[in-house]
Image (tube, helix red, strand yellow):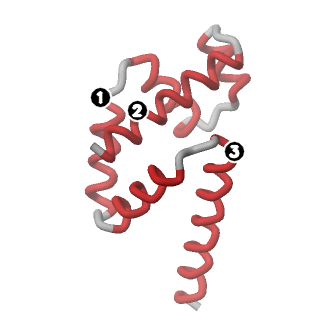
Amino acid sequence: MAAFSGWLFQVVRRECRRLERHVFDLDPYDEEKIENWLATHSDEIVRLDLISALESLPEHYREIILLRDFEGMTIREMAGRLQLTTTATKSRLRRARQLVREYLLA
């Protein structure tokens, strides 16, 4: 049963990444680099590197990632809290995620 759940988790994870690439029009080569990076680092290293990446961000980018990915707020909720348009909120979130990705792959 454990082998099946591990396999199923990997299938779901890959499908989520595929959908993310499609929805956010991400460069597939960057995604390949990320997959390789994740495969070659332990969970603890990934966690520490992610913390460092978040700490390296300017405050307005760090805040938007924390609101979305840690507090689970919607774009509309974030826009209201930050007093931004939804378009500006989406743009800021996309840029923040790009900066984190660049930091992790550097």
> Which residue was labeled with disc 2?
99
Give amino acid for label 3: Val
> Which residue was labeled with disc 1?
56
What residue lies at 33% left-to-right and 62% top-to-bottom? 43
Q: Kindly check if marks 3 and 1 are in contact, taking CB atoms under 8 A apart as contact.
A: no
> Which residue was labeled with disc 3?
23
Give amino acid for label 1: Ser
Q: Give the mark toward the camera: 1 or 2.
A: 2
Question: Secondary structure beneath disc 1?
Answer: helix
Q: Kindly check if marks 1 and 2 are in contact, taking CB atoms under 8 A apart as contact.
A: yes
Most extreme residue toward the top is 83
Q: CA distance from mark 2 to mark 3?
A: 18 Å
Q: Quadrant of the C terminus?
A: top left
Counting residues from the N terminus, which is met first, the one under dot 3 or under dot 1? 3
Within 10 Å of disc 3 (Cα), the crowding (few <14, some 14-19, many 20+) is few
What is the number of the mark on residue 14?
none
Counting residues from the N terminus, which is met first, the one under dot 2 or under dot 3? 3
